[in-house]
Image (spheres, coloured by chain):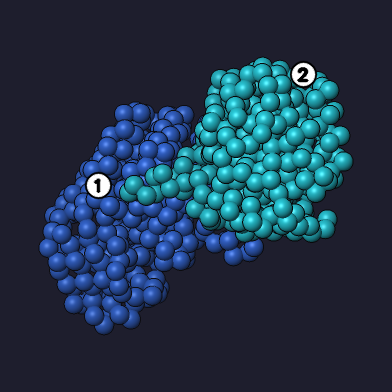
Chain colours: A cyan, B blue
Amino acid sequence: MRYAVIGTGAVGGYYGGLLARHGLDVHFLLHSDYIHVKKSGLVVESKDGDFVLPQVQAYSRPEDMPPCDVVIVALKTTQNAQLAAILPHVVKEKGIVVVLQNGLGLESDIARIVPHATILGGLCFLCSNKIGPGHIKHIDHGTIVLGEYAQEYRPCGITDNLELLSREFEQAGVLVKLSDNLGEARWRKLVWNVPFNGLSVVLDATTAQIMGCPATRSLARDIMIEVVTGANKCGYSVEEQYADDMLLRTEKMAVYKTSMKLDFERGMPLEIEKMYWRPVAEAESAGYVMTAVRTLALQLEYWDGRCAIES
Amino acid sequence: MRYAVIGTGAVGGYYGGLLARHGLDVHFLLHSDYIHVKKSGLVVESKDGDFVLPQVQAYSRPEDMPPCDVVIVALKTTQNAQLAAILPHVVKEKGIVVVLQNGLGLESDIARIVPHATILGGLCFLCSNKIGPGHIKHIDHGTIVLGEYAQEYRPCGITDNLELLSREFEQAGVLVKLSDNLGEARWRKLVWNVPFNGLSVVLDATTAQIMGCPATRSLARDIMIEVVTGANKCGYSVEEQYADDMLLRTEKMAVYKTSMKLDFERGMPLEIEKMYWRPVAEAESAGYVMTAVRTLALQLEYWDGRCAIES
């Protein structure tokens, strides 16, 4: 099987790096790091053992890549408009696209671009940063929850494609959990991402600071419960207890800067559309207004610079 | 009539200064500025004409003040716990207390301290800053909306005391509008104060920046509508149009830093309790959850330093 990695950053560089180290045929699409990686390869510092791939198959243009059986999408969702120009070149006629991004509605967007592909969605429980060109630092965790997409996010069970990908990833050292309900898995991930990504930017805070203040800890929980309620209104089954479990787990976490906070500090666009507005819109279609989530999203729009620069 | 001003800052210094300039017998309670004002008096720079009061009756201890007919409370509400030790010394047996503060439940608190006094509430539509010890800069406006307090904020009409105070203030050059419904007047003031004070701190923004960004302009309106709805649930009559009128007026305002933003920049405690939690609690008693207001209040608690310092 031939692999492509679209977006070789903290996520794509880490997982793609593991697959390549395992000897799989992996083709990396890069943008700003292309020249560096073409010349010097990839470096992955990992708590599970550092490794270097001195030579990788690197590309700067999707037209130059061979058609691949498995295409891993690991761009920031703010760049997803590029996928329409990338995927048709890279995904084989009956290929598999694995979407390793956060938010909602990613697979349905991609299904419109490559309607004949199988589309899997993956939720990465990964602490990883890109700390330099072609240089990934894997801090902790790494499990992927993988589910298959069917039209309108109908649950479609544990498919052969899921089993196949799971085996490939696990052989390369990636823990995979399979989900028979991708939509629900995506909403569950949002239960943590929505409060902690947003609040970390708006409050200029680490997770420890958010949790250390009774007011913002309580606000984080309020927002989690709103997302849980949104999920349930949309027909998924997520318990309030799940929010409290996540809260407890966050309390025990080391001081952690969310990915949105890192993006913000680097002056990169924030993933507001897929992580906030899509869930808000889906919940509203189901008759539920997520007011606190909406409040946070509007504040994020301000910090995202689209506004702050104007005035 | 003998006047006392409790809190000689942007509000108390300005209105008290006007009364004293008009020749009224005004006694000023001061804290940090006492020695300066005792020695050098009060300076008011005003768009309506600067004036200096080289000598004012200044006090640092309420015990030293004479009993007064009219006591103007112009402290920050974060200092209201001091009123129990101040007012019994300063308010005559049948005196009048005029509460020139923002928020809810201020008069009912004071009624417990001086049960025999008449209590009036005043909403100041005033742009004024204290720019140095005993030095007030009056930027714009100055109208006071004045209403009388009756138990549980029952509307009690335009009373003789309101007429009396209105005449006294107007002779000194202060525009006064009388309200027959103090509770409603206080809620109306919150329609502007809640969004713009809170957002200016959380977003580190002027009113022009909040209004200049479509996202935060829309958020300000959402919050205004929540406050309007809260007021109506509590039995007052405030129209949505009132929010839109205020929004339009804010758009036409000069770049303006809210009082909460100024407090924040000076490291002073924020008026969250009276301006946010009381309205949230009153609305909740009436069965309405103001989620966006609550979200903003919890964020303000974080910035208020009670939390930010801990972690």
Q: Position of residue B5 (x, y in %)?
A: 31, 64
Screen quadrant of the N terminus of chain A: top right
Have a look at marks 2 and 1 and say if they share a chain: no
Label 2 residue SS = loop
Relative horizontal placement of residue B40, taking residue A283 as reference (left or right): left
- Residue type at mark 1? Met
Relative horizontal placement of residue A221, taking residue B116 as reference (left or right): right
Q: Chain of mark 1?
A: B
Q: Residues within 10 Å of mark 1 (few under 14, many from 20)?
A: few
| Residue A190 seen | no
User: Is residue A38 or residue A293 the one in the foreground?
Assistant: A38
Residue under numbered circle 2 = A156
Residue at 41% from the left image edge and 41% from the top image edge: B216
User: Is residue B39 or residue A281 the one in the foreground?
Assistant: A281
Residue at 64% from the left image edge and 31% from the top image edge: A90
Residue at 54% from the left image edge and 29% from the top image edge: A84
How far apart marks 2 and 1 lie (CA) works out to 56 Å
Relative horizontal placement of residue B21, taking residue B306 as reference (left or right): left
Q: Is residue A114 above or below residue A51?
A: above
Total numbered badges shown on the rendered structure? 2
Q: Position of residue B155 (x, y in %)?
A: 36, 35
Q: Is residue A107 above or below residue B274?
A: above
Disc 2 + disc 1, Cβ < 8 Å: no
> Which mark's residue is nearer the viewer, 2 or 1?
2
User: Is residue A197 or residue A40 the one in the foreground?
Assistant: A40
Q: Quadrant of residue B34?
A: bottom left
Q: Position of residue A117 (x, y in %)?
A: 68, 22
Q: Chain of mark 2?
A: A
Residue under numbered circle 1 = B253
- Residue type at mark 2? Cys
Q: Position of residue B2 (x, y in %)?
A: 25, 64
Residue at 61% from the left image edge and 44% from the top image edge: A59
